[in-house]
């Protein structure tokens, strides 16, 4: 028996975006928590692009926030530019995207962790895990052993990671941090199946060496919402980004040197993401494209480093220089950090329950890139759920499963644990079937009550939410008031090319007209002076999209019917006569919690679900 | 517990004297009484487990006399309210009854669904559960087989094509939304309308084209073609089993095309007797001959009637040439006399006079349109389902095209619904497919 130096309720391994949320969720729900990280300097490190949010990811950030998480607050605090994507394409797909000051992001998150009571933050590489009865023992490379009731694995891309630049392979973590070379073996010993994935990051350039005159400037937007409901006031735009393009010469250099490209030659075995290919992969796969667009983004306000989005590569360093110099405006660019590919171990996420708990060992939770996902926001989303559930586990309470209709977090987790993934999984709005309901602006309406119930939503946050709810109600009441046919109405209807009604109508009915929105009504009538723009926007969407929202709600109700049929966890699929063999295998592999999850497993047919519902019923009686 | 009402044909079809159409579920009696009327029936007080005689309104002005039995929950097969109609046998009729009930908004039962409900309501003992599971599996297999095989996969293939077009459109819309920075803006919105109109047109064509559906709904059109005086009218009469057209020995008696129908194995067969084809200067007769040619070219099956007792003429050769590529059965008539006509590839020797091989000819007609191998009950249900699905797709498409003010997020939502509707026929409903297309078709990435 190892000598135990300290006892905790929970230990979180890894202090990236998943680990931070998990640790905070645990500590804030009164669990004595230890957060172990390979380097204190790697806490909440933005290892790739210096930005938070984007399509679907913006929604994830707001959902983490609505549950009582930290990412949104931190992103608002450290943003140096902010924009709303997809304006004009409809409310369902609008997402915030912020350029973050990567240094500030790290520092601010570290401060929050350091000041959290119940939370111990400590540097140390975990090399071994042992499960002894109810206790989980964690041993670091310096031989210290800690014990806890539950563990959260949030190791990111550090497991046996290798950096690849041309023919150079280094056994390190991202950005020169040391990697975790022993933990994967310990996971294997617990019977966990591992996968090997890869990802990559582009070069960082010195700002003074860039010819900005040849590039297009991208500005942020003022006067827009923030990620967090806790943030007062707007985010200030303090930096700009630049748009530029590759040239035929860039493509020529790449084509002539494909033999030196590890991603193409087969040197890299890990599975990379299709949505984030290296520049050499893009040139090969889309040979007819004459140019690819690239964005130049500032890494932080206190540094000259610029991130070249779209230019991830694992070509040899000398070629990287040649390639960069062939890009418009980068003819004389100085490279400060080379681009690299990184290979790492992760687990097959179908080994997890939708609670992110390992099916085979109770009390072990997994979150973030170790689950085969990619992205800071995806990591944070899993982190907060894993943290909440580790806390529920410690308290002996029922664990939280977010449904696909609750939020993108529910979609994300359901997708990976039910279908698995064969590449780093990225959240997309296309993956959410109820995306009209899963908007960024109503994340709190969907999740704050849930966060409150598990004890993560503070009084301050909850009161703000109640106040918002009340204000929305007031706005909706005002909409029910009738307006007379007078000059004001005539003016509004003329301006919007709508036909004037024959009798007095409610503001609500006005809002139902295609060309009239709530802001035009406000302009004319000044009835919403006391309300924020964001609240009016929300009500506007509710009224304008009422029919579709109702339809989505009906779809959800239909889905929930199957979702509520629980499958006993000891159900023996191999003895289930009438199920096709393929279905038997898939079902016993995934072990779905309920009929709804079962129906989403690929290879399980509607007839199988019919059969299964009968077998469950028979088992129950 | 009572679920939403469902309907299905519950008896084997085709040869039986009666067929049973069964409804089960909440308020199914109310639905049934919308189309079933009986003088002695008080709609508010229908006596359960009692045969009610009345009329089922199939279409405007078309009624079927039948029997209705009402089983009040829980005393029924499924444990829910159940209504059974006992109607006359035959595919066509059962099809029409099913049509008129699904038009009320009652959905077709899924494979084995009646038994499943019976089981879940505790009407069937546990040891029978396995039998029901077998039924579900067998039914879904035959359902799938029928919906695919009935048109030799051609229908499925066409719908696949439509779905592919839709998938591409969806992928383009989705990629623009998920990667707003990385896709160079295209004028997709203007493009959408034209592309959706194409999809609508293609859907309408498939609906029209759905031949076997047409056969089952409208019957098989069979043209009787031949020189004058080879006995077309006598064969038509023999097939109909009663005297109908005027039969004379004077050439050119049947100047116009006449049609008459009969039922065979539950399928309606429409016979079109055409004017005899010959060289003539008679203007009126020539009009008739032109019409004959047209009719025979449009028919599903052509019976080319030859007088077995005479050698073929130049006229016969011309007709034969005209019919090349059509479904032709050579009917050698007057075989009671010495045969002089040459042997044909797909021929049947008949005698209108004695009735020889007339039944064989009927069977051969079904063979020609490949209806002989179809399990008629399965085919009706599979077809009915396809028809409804295509109709549903068409309606949704028209709705989508009717309002151009929708934002892209809503549009894509509706298009995804549409994609799933087609998927009910092709079996292809995986959202992952669209995402895969996004990555294979578009160059994305930071």
Image: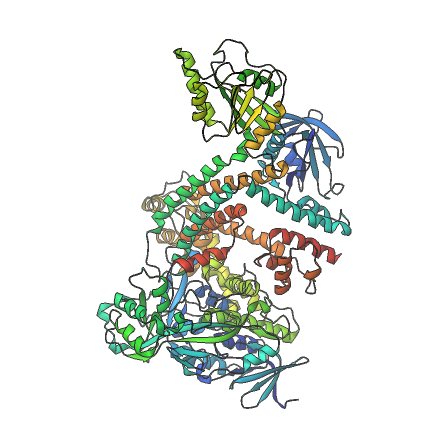
Give the color scheme: rainbow, by chain, secondary structure or one colour.
rainbow
Q: If the image is split into quadrants, where does the N terminus of chain A sit? A: bottom right
**How many numbered discs sit on the rendered protein?**
0
Vertical comparison of A45 with A425: above or below? below
Viewer-proximal residue among B254 and A559 = B254
Viewer-proximal residue among B168 and B221 = B221
> Percent x, y for residue A508?
45, 48
> Percent x, y for residue A506?
44, 46
Specify the quadrant of the image occupied by residue A615: bottom right
Specify the quadrant of the image occupied by residue B280: top left
In this rendering, does residue A361 appear at all?
A: yes
Vertical comparison of B222 with A138: above or below? above
Tell me: A387 left or right of B126: left
Q: What residue is drawn where x is 25% and y is 77%?
A: A209
Tell me: A34 left or right of A233: right
In this rendering, does residue B446 appear at all?
A: no
> Percent x, y for residue A194?
55, 73
Q: What residue is drawn where x is 30% and y is 70%?
A: A256
Specify the quadrant of the image occupied by residue B43: top right
> Percent x, y for residue B173?
40, 54
Viewer-proximal residue among B271 and A361 = B271
Vertical comparison of B376 with B281: above or below? below
Tell me: A405 left or right of B50: left
Q: Residue furthest left?
A: A213
Q: If the image is split into quadrants, where does the C terminus of chain A sit? A: bottom right
């Amino acid at each position: 028996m190892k000598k135990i130096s300290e006892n905790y309720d929970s230990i979180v391994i890894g202090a990236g975006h998943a680990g931070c949320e998990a640790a905070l969720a645990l500590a804030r729900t009164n669990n004595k928590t230890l957060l172990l990280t390979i380097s204190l300097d790697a806490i909440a490190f933005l290892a790739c692009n210096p930005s938070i949010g984007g399509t679907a990811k913006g929604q994830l950030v707001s959902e983490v926030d609505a549950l009582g998480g930290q990412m949104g607050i931190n992103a608002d605090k450290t943003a140096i530019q902010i924009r709303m994507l997809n304006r004009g394409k409809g409310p369902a797909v609008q997402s915030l995207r912020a350029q973050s000051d990567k240094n500030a992001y790290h520092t601010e998150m570290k401060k929050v962790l350091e000041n959290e009571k119940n939370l111990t933050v400590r540097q140390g590489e975990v090399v071994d895990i042992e499960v002894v009865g109810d206790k989980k023992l964690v041993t670091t490379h310096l031989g210290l052993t800690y014990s806890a009731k539950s563990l959260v694995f949030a190791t990111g891309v550090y497991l046996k990671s290798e950096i690849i630049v041309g023919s150079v392979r280094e056994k390190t973590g991202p950005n020169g941090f040391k990697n975790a070379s022993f933990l994967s073996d310990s996971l294997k010993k617990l019977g966990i199946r591992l996968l090997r994935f890869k990802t990559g990051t582009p070069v960082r350039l010195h700002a003074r060496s860039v010819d900005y005159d040849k590039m297009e400037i991208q500005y942020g937007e003022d006067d827009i919402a923030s990620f967090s409901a806790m943030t007062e006031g707007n985010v200030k735009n303090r930096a700009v980004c630049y748009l530029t393009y590759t040239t035929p010469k860039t493509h020529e250099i790449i084509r002539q040197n494909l033999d030196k490209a590890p991603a193409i030659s087969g040197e890299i075995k890990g599975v990379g993401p299709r949505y984030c290919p290296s520049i050499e992969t893009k040139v090969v796969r889309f040979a007819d494209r004459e140019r690819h667009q690239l964005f130049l983004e500032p890494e932080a306000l206190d540094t000259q480093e610029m991130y070249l989005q779209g230019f991830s590569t694992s070509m040899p360093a000398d070629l990287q220089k040649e390639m960069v110099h062939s890009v418009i405006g980068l003819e004389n660019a100085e490279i400060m950090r080379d681009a690299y590919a990184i290979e790492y171990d992760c687990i097959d996420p179908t080994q997890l329950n939708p609670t992110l708990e390992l099916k085979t060992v109770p009390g072990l939770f997994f979150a973030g890139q170790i689950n085969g996902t990619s992205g800071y926001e995806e990591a944070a989303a899993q982190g907060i759920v894993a943290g909440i559930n580790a806390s529920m586990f410690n308290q002996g309470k029922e664990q939280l499963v977010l449904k696909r209709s609750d939020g993108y977090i529910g979609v994300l987790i359901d997708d990976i644990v039910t279908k698995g993934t064969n590449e780093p999984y990225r959240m997309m709005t296309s993956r959410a079937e109820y995306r009209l309901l899963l908007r960024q602006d109503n994340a709190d309406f969907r999740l704050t009550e849930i966060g409150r119930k598990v004890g993560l939503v503070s009084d301050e946050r909850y009161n703000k939410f109640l106040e918002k709810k009340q204000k929305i109600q007031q706005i909706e009441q005002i909409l029910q008031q009738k307006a007379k046919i007078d000059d004001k109405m005539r003016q509004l209807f003329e301006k919007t090319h709508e036909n004037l009604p024959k009798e007095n109508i409610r503001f609500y009915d006005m809002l139902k007209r295609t060309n009239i929105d709530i802001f035009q009504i406000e302009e004319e009538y000044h009835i919403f002076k006391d309300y924020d723009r964001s609240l009016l926007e929300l009500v506007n969407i509710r009224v304008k999209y009422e029919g579709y929202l109702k339809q989505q709600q009906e779809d959800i109700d239909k889905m929930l019917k199957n979702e509520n049929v629980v499958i006993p966890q000891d159900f023996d699929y191999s003895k289930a006569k009438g199920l096709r063999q393929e279905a038997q295998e898939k079902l016993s592999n995934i072990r779905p919690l309920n009929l709804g999850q079962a129906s989403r497993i690929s290879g399980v047919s509607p007839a199988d679900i019919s059969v299964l519902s009968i077998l469950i019923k028979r088992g129950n009686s | 517990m009572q679920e939403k009402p469902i309907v299905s044909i519950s008896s084997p079809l085709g040869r039986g004297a009666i067929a049973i159409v069964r409804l089960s579920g909440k308020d199914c009696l109310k639905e049934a009484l919308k189309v079933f009327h009986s003088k002695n029936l008080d709609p508010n007080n229908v006596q359960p487990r009692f045969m009610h005689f009345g009329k089922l309104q199939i279409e405007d002005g078309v009624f079927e006399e039948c029997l209705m039995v009402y089983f009040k929950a829980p005393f029924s097969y499924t444990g829910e309210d159940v209504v059974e109609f006992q109607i006359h046998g035959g595919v066509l009729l059962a099809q029409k009854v099913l049509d008129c009930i699904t038009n009320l908004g009652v959905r077709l039962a899924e494979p084995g669904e009646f038994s499943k409900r019976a089981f879940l309501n505790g009407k069937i003992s546990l040891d029978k559960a396995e039998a029901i599971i077998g039924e579900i599996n067998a039914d879904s297999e035959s359902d799938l087989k029928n919906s695919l095989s009935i048109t030799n996969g051609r229908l499925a293939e066409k719908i696949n094509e439509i779905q592919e077009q839709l998938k591409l459109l969806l992928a383009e819309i989705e990629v623009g939304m998920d990667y707003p920075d990385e896709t160079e803006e295209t004028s997709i919105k203007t493009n959408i309308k034209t592309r959706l109109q194409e999809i609508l047109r293609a859907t309408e064509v498939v609906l029209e084209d759905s031949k076997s559906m047409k056969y089952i709904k409208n019957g098989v059109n069979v043209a009787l073609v031949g020189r004058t005086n080879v006995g077309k009218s006598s064969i038509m009469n023999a097939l109909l089993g009663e005297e109908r057209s005027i039969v004379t020995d004077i050439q050119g008696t049947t100047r116009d095309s006449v049609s008459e129908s009969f039922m065979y194995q539950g399928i309606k067969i429409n016979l079109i007797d055409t004017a005899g084809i010959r060289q003539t200067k008679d203007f009126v007769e020539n009009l008739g001959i032109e019409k004959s040619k047209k009719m025979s070219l449009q028919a599903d099956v052509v019976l080319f009637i030859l007088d077995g007792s005479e050698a073929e003429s130049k006229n016969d050769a011309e007709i034969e040439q005209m019919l090349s590529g059509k479904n032709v059965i050579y009917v050698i008539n007057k075989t009671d006399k010495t045969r002089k006509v040459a042997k044909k590839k797909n021929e049947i020797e008949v005698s209108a006079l004695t009735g020889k091989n007339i039944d064989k000819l009927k069977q051969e007609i079904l063979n020609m349109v490949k209806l002989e191998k179809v399990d008629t009950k399965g085919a009706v249900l599979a077809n009915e389902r396809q028809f409804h699905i295509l109709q549903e797709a068409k309606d949704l498409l028209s709705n989508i095209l009717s309002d151009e003010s929708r934002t892209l997020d809503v549009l894509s939502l509706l298009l995804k619904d549409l994609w799933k509707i087609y998927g009910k026929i092709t079996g292809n409903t995986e959202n992952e497919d669209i995402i895969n297309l996004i990555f294979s078709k578009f160059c994305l990435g930071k």
